[in-house]
Structure formats: structure tokens, C-alpha cells
Image (spheres, rainbow, N blue to C red):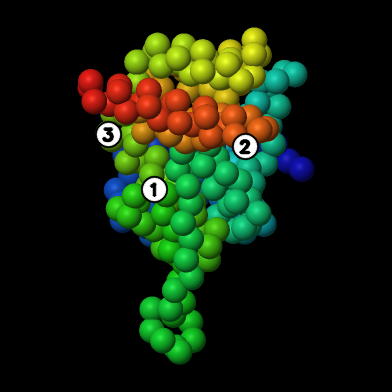
Amino acid sequence: MSDPLRRESLPQEAAVAASKLDLNVILNMPAGPEMDALVAKEVMGYAIDFEEWPSASGDSKRIWFIVSSEQGVARTRIPKYSTDIEAAWVVGKKMRSRGDALSLQHRHMIDDAPGTAIWTAWFRRANDLAWAVTPSLAICRAALLTIRSSDETPAKTVAGNLFSIIEHELAKIMGPIAPLIVHEKLAEFGESRDKFPESRVDSFLKTLGEEIPDEGERASFAAAMAEVLLIKRRRS
């Protein structure tokens, strides 16, 4: 294969940040490498790059990569999030880790009319609704809309001492390992205890409760935390 014509980092070129994209741009952006690159950067959180290679017609073709610094700088091809449903499910899983559960529906725009069926997808709020002719593209568009909405609205955070209370309650059941469990779950959510979004607390506690094997103890932990949250929300 010949050398690439040009290589640039993403911040200097293509894939405009989702927070700056107009709603209609996202809803009309087609499936393909550009959409996949935008999802990889804005939703999945990857560092990405691209190269331009000459094609048989004389035009250049842009190839996108995920850039990793592990074991030196390495690059891998970006998954086809917008055309491969298995890759799109990974996007859905990533959004769920943020506390944004996916809703996906198959609808007919006109009853019994071939070619008019569409997929609608959204995370959390109805105003994040997206649609497309395929489920994978609908999921990608909805994820970008949700990220865009989150970027535009500063998230309200919880008091840092909430996690000390969580660890204390969890330790009653799990013992000294409780702080480690909380730390690992925070890492999975990609958040810090001093800037944790209030909107994700319920999802975090539900996920944390799943670590408690005994159903009765799990219910006890959930009840204790519900009481703590109720008191805190009344004071705020």
C-alpha cells in the first residue's frame, strides 16, 4: 500500500464536536465512516485520527482510526457503529453506563406501505428522539443528541460526603471491601466522587446494589440509601 497523502489529528479537521452540531445536522447525518468517527470520539470517548489514501479514481479516501497510547502508540479501525447492529449495541451499553437507558422502537410511517418503516431511538428524555431507516443509525443519532444535550446543560453534582455514607452503609453488608467496590464502580461510570452528577446517583446505587448477593441485604441497602437521598434532597 502506498503512503498516505495526508495525516491530521481530529481536533484540527473533520467530525465537529457534537455539542456544536445543529439538531438537523445530526438527524440527517448518514451512516458511514464520518458518523462512526464522531460516535467514537463524542460517545465512546476515544482519541481518533485519520489518514487520506489515494483511490483508483484519483480521489483521496479518508480512513479513520482509534488511537491508543497503551504499549506505545497503536491504531485500530473504528467499529462500524452506524451500520453494524452489534457495534451499535456497544454504544447503547456505553450510554447505559452513564445512566441513559436505550429505548428502541420499529414503526411504520404509513400502515401497510412498503419502504416507510423507520426506527426511533432515544436515551432518557423524549427530546433526544432520533430516527433512521436502520436501528444502528438510529441508536448512533440518539446517542449524539443525548451527549449534545448533556454538554449544553451543566450537570448538578452531589456532595462529596455522599460516597462516604454509601461506603459506610455498604460496609455493614460487604465489610472492609466496600470502599474498593465503590471505587471500581465509580471508574466504570467514568466519574469522580467530587463531581458526580446528581442525575446518575439512582443508577449508580442500583448498579452497586447488584454486587450484594443476598436479596434481603440488597433490599436493606437500597432502603437505607433511599432514606439518605430523601433527606439530602429535602435539604437542597
Categorize mark 2 by other alpha carbons within 10 Å: few (<14), some (14-19), many (20+).
Answer: few
Nearer the observer, 26 or 230: 230
Three-letter code, disc 3: Thr
| Quadrant (top left, top right, bottom left, bottom right) of the C terminus | top left
- Position of residue 178 in the picture relative to residue 144 (left or right): right
Q: Position of residue 29 (x, y in %)?
A: 42, 56
Percent position of residue 42, x then y: 46, 37
Residue contact between numbered discs 3 and 2, judged by CB atoms under 8 Å: no
Give the number of the disc on residue 215.
2
| SS at circle 2 | helix
Q: Residues within 10 Å of mark 1 (few under 14, many from 20)?
A: some
Residue at point 27%, 34% (across, down): 153
* Pointer 2 with pointer 1, Cβ within 8 A: no
| Rendered location of residue 86, percent (x, y) | 65, 54
x, y percent for residue 128: 35, 51
Tell me the amino acid under the disc marked 2: Glu
Q: Determine if residue 196 is in view.
A: yes
Which of labels 3 and 1 is toward the front? 1
Q: Which is in the foreground here, disc 3 or disc 2?
A: 2
- In the picture of the structure, the residue carrying the numbered disc 3 is 153
Helix, strand or loop for disc 1: loop
Q: Decide which of 114, 30 is in the foreground and name it.
A: 114
Which one is earlier in the sequence, the residue at label 3 or at label 2?
A: 3
Residue type marked 1: Arg
Q: Are marks 3 and 1 in contact (CB under 8 Å)?
A: no
Image-quadrant location for residue 4: top right
Tell which of 213 and 34 is nearer to you.
Answer: 213
Residue found 51% across the figure and 18% down from its top:
169
Query: Depth-wise, is mark 2 or mark 1 nearer the camera?
Result: 2
- Vertical order, 3 against 25 (above or below): above
Residue with the mark numbered 1? 124
The quadrant of the image that shows the N terminus is: top right
